[in-house]
Image: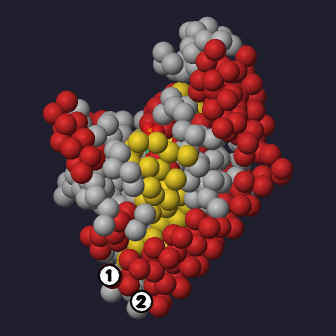
Amino acid sequence: MRTYELSKNGYDRSKRYLAGGVASSLRAAMKPVPLFAESAQGAVVRDVDGNAYIDYLLGYGPLILGHAYGPVNEKVYAAMQRGITYGLQHQGEIELAKLLTEVLPCADKVALSGSGTEAVMLALRLARAYTGRSKIIRFHGHYHGWSDSIYTSFPSADMPSASASATASGAVPPGTAGQSELSLRDVVLLPWNDQAALEAALAEHEGEIAAVISEPVMCNSGCIVPRPGYLEFMREATAKRGIVLILDEVITGFRLGLGGAHGRFGIKPDLVTVGKAMGGGFAVSGVAGRAELMALIDDGTVSHLGTLNGNCVATAAALATIGELAKDDGAAYDKMEKNASKLTAGLRTLLGKHGIRGVINEIGPVFHFIFTEQTVVEDFASFNLRDSAKYALFAERMLEAGVLVRPNGLWYVSAAHEDADIDATLEAADRVLGGLR
Ligand SMILES: Cc1ncc(COP(=O)(O)O)c(C=O)c1O
């Protein structure tokens, strides 16, 4: 039996000084207690009570090469010896920007920031400035960061306070208290993977829409892939009306391949936002896209600011991470996809063995595992029928069995996971699912 005494003590102490006891609201959902990490290496994280876990949380996605990856750390240390941030130009920024234009198919130019939230803020601003329009179409179940102008509709098992649906007046509800409802006045909230709904909204708001923003795969709510032709329709319908298409690739970027989901699907958005895996765990994000849009930053029409933007640590980390991912013709991707397929196939077999109903939606090295009576989950409405309490219990028991998974069901596989980790994970899941029946 594992104990979590030191984590429990740590959480009690942290609640005295740290608002909410955690540094990001999602983390409070972990049961039996938000774990205090002691150290981590590769695919394994250790807590302060001496427990070790095979890690599929991976820092909520960025750790695509695993924890404390040596070759990236070395490049970052070397960069730090020459200075951490200058507030001046330096070679690393140019190298990273150039590399991004080479690997992201939609990128003529890029802008660098520190988080996915900031990248989305910039992309929306560019779209509004470019079109001279103010409305933004976004979709239920997608998450684009927590800024006031976009944060709504993110019902997640680990974010119980966020709102799920439009209010009776049709207004888009804020995702949190303290957020001005006016900040969402220009947001049109639609079901995703629904071509007719998009078509109707585009007709209703003809001439008013600045941008459509979408995760290319609805990773945050069920890892649901676009129906055949849906993204193509989105691209065509926005282009026809002079609307900026923003694909938010903060999860999918550098996770589904160097060219992200838009490279994988062959869709060319006007703008793309990237973060998480691009920096391998360091704080860096970017907006990349068409020259005409990015030119609004060139000529000062659109402000893009940030004290630490493009700092030496961030650029060194991103250059090193992308370099590792690109090595040997993307061998890291082949390994991650092979391991993720073995894991999801094994979990499905175990669901069958234990007579438990569930769905696993996957794309490459990311998948969403839910308990549900349905056999297919391909939109947000069906995703919401999941048994999230049962999954949270599964996650808690997996922790007890030495496997760290996010309480909402989203799993990430890294290049550090080995075949033996997958076998050990499946053995743990076998025991846990057996006990859940
Ligand atoms: C698709 C998407 N966009 C934006 C964000 C916000 O990124 P960050 O947490 O780095 O601000 C996230 C974070 O999970 C995300 O999943």
Q: Residue at x 50, y 76 (%)?
A: 427
Q: Residue furthest right?
A: 328
Percent of width and height locating residue 314: 59, 27
Q: Residue at x 70, y 32 (%)?
A: 319
Where is mark 1, residue-wise?
436
Report whether the residue tagged 1 is closer than 8 Å to ligand 1: no
Q: Nearer the viewer, residue 294 or 332?
A: 332
> Which quadrant of the rendered structure holds the C terminus?
bottom left
Q: Quadrant of residue 73?
A: top right
Where is mark 2, residue-wise?
354
Label 2 residue SS: helix
Q: Nearer the viewer, residue 404 or 95?
A: 404
Label 1 residue SS: helix
- CA neighbours of label 1 inside 10 A, class few (<14), some (14 to 19), many (20+): few
Q: Residue at x 41, y 42 (%)?
A: 38
What type is the residue that disc 2 sits on? His
Disc number placed over residue 48 in the picture, else none: none
Contact (CB < 8 A) between labels 2 and 1? yes
Real-space CA distance between mark 2 and mark 1, rounded to the nearest whole angstrom: 9 Å
Q: Nearer the viewer, residue 211 or 162?
A: 162
Percent of width and height locating residue 370: 41, 73
